[in-house]
């Protein structure tokens, strides 16, 4: 007698197109290339994803943590996912019957078995348990998946694409020399009486008005917050962004960045749709004797400015940890906030600038400046209360990790051990694009 044919139900991993801010973090993190994207959406290949969960924790919005129980034979193809504006509804008849797939068995504990909510995923990054390597994935992740132990608890996803909050522009000015090509703006947004709690190192999404050529609403673009938790002006419910007007793509072809041009052209009084806040790991330690080693290029200075300013305000209340900054730009004129940075007292922050295109001078990157200060960087590396933050161009990540390895090795430190420990302890944060 024949029994019923077993029906295979797959717990299919999907990305919510309404929440996703297209930051590429998941695609970069996935150890087996199961995630891809087109100009519309980030999607997961059902036949490749093994549910290793390496992508879940780094996602700043939680868009990554979505699952549908579907007949395996009818799993959503990437071509279909590319066209979605929202996730499909769960078929009630299949709900709760899905399994992630044979390759994933044994890995399901990484995010509570898969379909945890975005809030849970943000919470999980705060527990010490998540410092354990995620099976099959996190060893390939180069920075921390957990915040510093003493970081304040962040709020995330209070406002979404469907329910954005409106902020009013109260300031917009250029922070690079007018003679340079690099048009970087400091933009201050005020939230009035609406709650918008943020921490240094978090980011927000901006939704530019209008539609794409094919009539879709623009996706939100992500920007790091450049001001401290208590406001660009202390005690005010406002925050600042550092935005570079995009006029060329990575290949040097002329393009008009939709959101960056929109933001750089805003006038005082204009109203902006904001999502967020996002991010629950790239956060600063709260304990007063923690040291910050900050390495950035160009507009990657935004979170460093936020952390530095928060420390400056706390210094008066007894914060004692050291601040060391390595900051790279093409020229002095292209370095955002050059003037204010120069005015910070030397005994408060140890600032090291690296310019790559100063006429008549050799190219100099942040890595070169770090090498020159190897003894002082090594002293920070030795310290259990040192937290490293790297933000800016993708290309700098390799170079910075290599120079840290060299500096550690020359100082007699085993970089592989130190690196793993700093990652697990929420002391090595990388945010590069
Ligand atoms: P940029 O002006 O293009 O470059 C800044 C400096 O970095 C230049 O001196 C550049 O040198 C140098 N550089 C290039 N490759 C490098 C490498 N491999 N190692 C070290 N230094 C290198 O920078 P930008 O246009 O301001 O871009 C900054 C990046 O930060 C962007 O990718 C942006 O997405 C990202 N970011 C921005 C924010 C934000 O809130 N705005 C937040 C996080 C990250 P040369 O070009 O002369 O070689």
Image: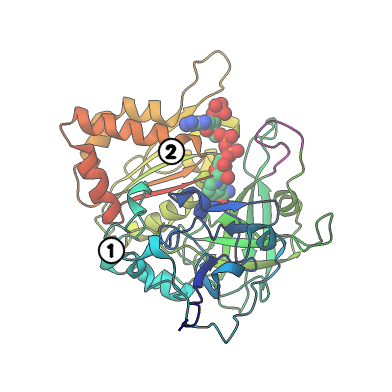
Residue 125 lies in the magenta-colored region: no
Vertical arrangement, residue 255 with respect to residue 109, above or below: above
Principal SS element in the magenta part? loop
**Of pointers 2 and 1, the one earlier in the residue sequence:** 1
Foreground pick, 44 / 208: 44
Q: Nearer the viewer, mark 2 or mark 1?
A: 2
| Location of mark 2 (residue) | 397
On-image quarter of the N terminus: bottom left
On-image quarter of the C terminus: top right
Residue in view at x 65 percent, y 75 percent: 88
Mark identifier at residue 149: 1
- Near mark 1 (Cα within 10 A), the count class, few <14, some 14-19 or many ≥20, is some
Q: CA–CA distance between discs 2 and 1?
A: 24 Å
- Judged left or right of residue 372, residue 3 is right
- Secondary element at tag 1: loop
- Near mark 2 (Cα within 10 A), the count class, few <14, some 14-19 or many ≥20, is many
Mark identifier at residue 210: none
Residue found farthest to the top: 360
Foreground pick, 395 / 68: 68
**How far from the left and from the top, in percent, is residue 304?**
45, 49
| Quarter of image, ligand 1 | top right
Residue in view at x 43 percent, y 59 percent: 50
Q: Which span of residues is magenta-colored?
A: 245-254
Residue found farthest to the bottom: 92
**How far from the left and from the top, in percent, is residue 421?**
23, 50
């Amino acid at each position: 007698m024949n029994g019923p044919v077993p029906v295979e139900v797959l717990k299919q991993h999907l990305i919510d197109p309404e929440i996703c801010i297209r930051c590429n973090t998941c695609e970069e993190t996935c150890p087996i290339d199961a995630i891809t994207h087109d100009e519309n959406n980030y999607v997961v290949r059902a036949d490749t994803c093994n549910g290793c969960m390496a992508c879940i924790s780094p996602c700043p919005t939680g868009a990554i943590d979505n699952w549908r129980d579907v007949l395996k034979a009818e799993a959503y193809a990437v071509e279909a996912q590319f066209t979605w504006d929202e996730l499909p509804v769960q078929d009630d008849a299949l709900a709760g019957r899905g399994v992630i797939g044979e390759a994933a068995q044994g890995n399901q504990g990484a995010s509570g078995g898969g379909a945890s909510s975005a809030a849970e995923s943000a919470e999980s990054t705060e527990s010490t348990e998540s410092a354990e390597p995620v099976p099959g994935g996190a060893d390939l992740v180069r920075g921390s998946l957990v915040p510093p132990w003493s970081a304040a608890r962040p709020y995330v996803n209070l406002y979404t694409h469907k329910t954005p909050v409106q902020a009013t522009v109260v300031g917009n000015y250029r922070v690079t020399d007018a003679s340079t090509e690099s048009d970087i703006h400091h933009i201050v947004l005020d939230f009035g009486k609406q709650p918008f709690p943020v921490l240094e190192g978090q980011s927000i999404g901006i939704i530019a008005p209008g539609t794409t050529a094919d009539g879709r609403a623009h996706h939100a673009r992500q920007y790091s917050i450049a001001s401290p938790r208590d406001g660009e002006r202390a005690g005010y419910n406002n925050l600042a962004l550092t935005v570079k007007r995009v006029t060329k793509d990575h290949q040097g072809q002329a393009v008009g960045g939709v959101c960056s041009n929109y933001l750089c052209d805003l006038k005082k009084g204009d109203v902006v749709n904001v999502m967020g806040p996002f991010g629950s790991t790239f956060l600063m330690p709260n304990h007063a004797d923690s040291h910050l080693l900050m390495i950035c290029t160009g507009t990657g200075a935004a979170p460093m400015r936020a952390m530095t300013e928060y420390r400056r305000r706390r210094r008066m209340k007894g914060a004692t940890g050291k601040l060391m900054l390595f900051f790279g730009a093409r020229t002095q004129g292209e370095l955002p906030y050059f003037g204010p940075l120069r005015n910070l007292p030397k005994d408060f922050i140890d600032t090291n600038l690296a310019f790559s295109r100063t006429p008549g001078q050799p190219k100099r990157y942040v890595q070169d400046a770090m090498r020159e200060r190897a003894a002082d960087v090594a002293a920070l590396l030795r310290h259990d209360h040192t937290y490293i933050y790297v933000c800016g161009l993708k290309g700098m990540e390799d170079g910075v990790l290599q120079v840290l390895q060299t500096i550690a090795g020359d100082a007699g430190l085993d970089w592989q051990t130190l690196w793993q420990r700093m990652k697990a302890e929420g002391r090595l944060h990388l945010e590069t694009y």
